[in-house]
């Protein structure tokens, strides 16, 4: 079974980083969700203020169910905030809302990495799903060497998507912190708290990218080992 071959050790760094990232986002979000921002703005109000100050009056801000389910939908131009972020007045709520607003600003300005990531969505979805299945078929059935190569190629697009996501997320956080300071929605100490929340969230994307890269390397090594046999 290739699931238990020696190349599994390659995934250990990614697994450890993922566990650490989940710990950091959980503890940071929980800690700063208990600290109310001095402005008293809710996440929804902070997002709306940033959008208005940048002339994005047509971008809507709506609540959505779930915990940390916040995201920006470029197709409908809607910022969807989880209910605790939408209604909350904590540093965590304001930071997360501002981050998602950063994505709306990226979209409006034609930020290239975001455009590139959007173009990768279809092939990335195929690569992470069908690509993995093709790899498994190719590994278990030696006669299907071409299918294995196609699977690895498809999975590569999923890996590239994870890598492209990194500058998009970090830039959104940078925009968020700058706008919160310029709009005087958060003070000096509060900005440090917001940065801690956003840095912890960004670490989860780093962990996902590392896991994808190492998995791709693992697939390639297994394929080469099979060819050498």
Image (cartoon, helix red, strand yellow):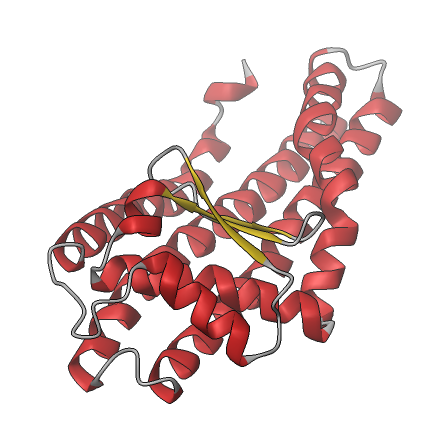
Residue 181 position in % (x across, y down): 34, 85
Relative to residue 141, is residue 107 drawn left or right?
A: left
Tell me the residue at 16%/74% (across/down): 38
Percent position of residue 217, x then y:
61, 44
Q: Give percent across and percent down for residue 150.
A: 83, 32
Quarter of the image where the N terminus is located: top right
Q: Quadrant of residue 9?
A: top left
Of residues 116 and 149, the one drawn nearer to the viewer in this rendering: 116
In the depicted view, which residue is nearer to us: 140 or 211? Answer: 211
Considering every residue shown, the one lying at the far right of the view is 146
**One can see residue 173 in this view:** no
Instruction: Judge left or right: residue 25 versus residue 148.
Output: left
Residue 39 in sight in this render: yes
Q: Is residue 1 left or right of residue 154?
A: left
Image position, residue 74 (x, y; %): 67, 53
The residue at 27%/66% (across/down) is 41
Judge whether 17 appears above or below 228 on screen: below
The structure residue drawn at horizontal position 33% and vertical position 65%, both measured from the top left corner, is: 95
């Amino acid at each position: 079974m290739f699931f238990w071959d020696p190349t599994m050790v390659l995934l250990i760094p990614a697994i450890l980083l993922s566990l650490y990232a989940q710990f950091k986002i959980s503890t940071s979000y929980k800690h700063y969700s208990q600290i109310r921002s001095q402005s008293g703005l809710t996440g929804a109000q902070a997002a709306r203020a940033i959008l208005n100050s940048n002339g994005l009056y047509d971008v809507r801000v709506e609540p959505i169910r779930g915990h940390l389910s916040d995201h920006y939908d470029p197709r409908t131009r809607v910022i969807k905030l989880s209910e605790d972020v939408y209604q909350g007045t904590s540093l965590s709520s304001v930071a997360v809302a501002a981050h998602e607003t950063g994505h709306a600003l990226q979209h409006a300005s034609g930020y290239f990495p975001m455009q590139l990531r959007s173009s990768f969505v279809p092939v990335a979805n195929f690569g992470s799903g069908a690509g993995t299945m093709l790899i498994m078929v190719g590994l278990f059935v030696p006669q299907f060497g071409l299918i294995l190569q196609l699977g690895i190629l498809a999975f590569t697009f999923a890996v590239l998507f994870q890598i492209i996501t990194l500058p998009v997320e970090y830039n959104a956080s940078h925009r968020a912190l700058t706008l919160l300071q310029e709009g005087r929605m958060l003070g000096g100490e509060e900005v440090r708290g917001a940065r801690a929340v956003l840095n912890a969230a960004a670490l989860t994307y780093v962990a996902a990218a590392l896991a994808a890269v190492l998995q791709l390397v693992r697939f390639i090594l297994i394929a080469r080992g099979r060819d050498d046999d």
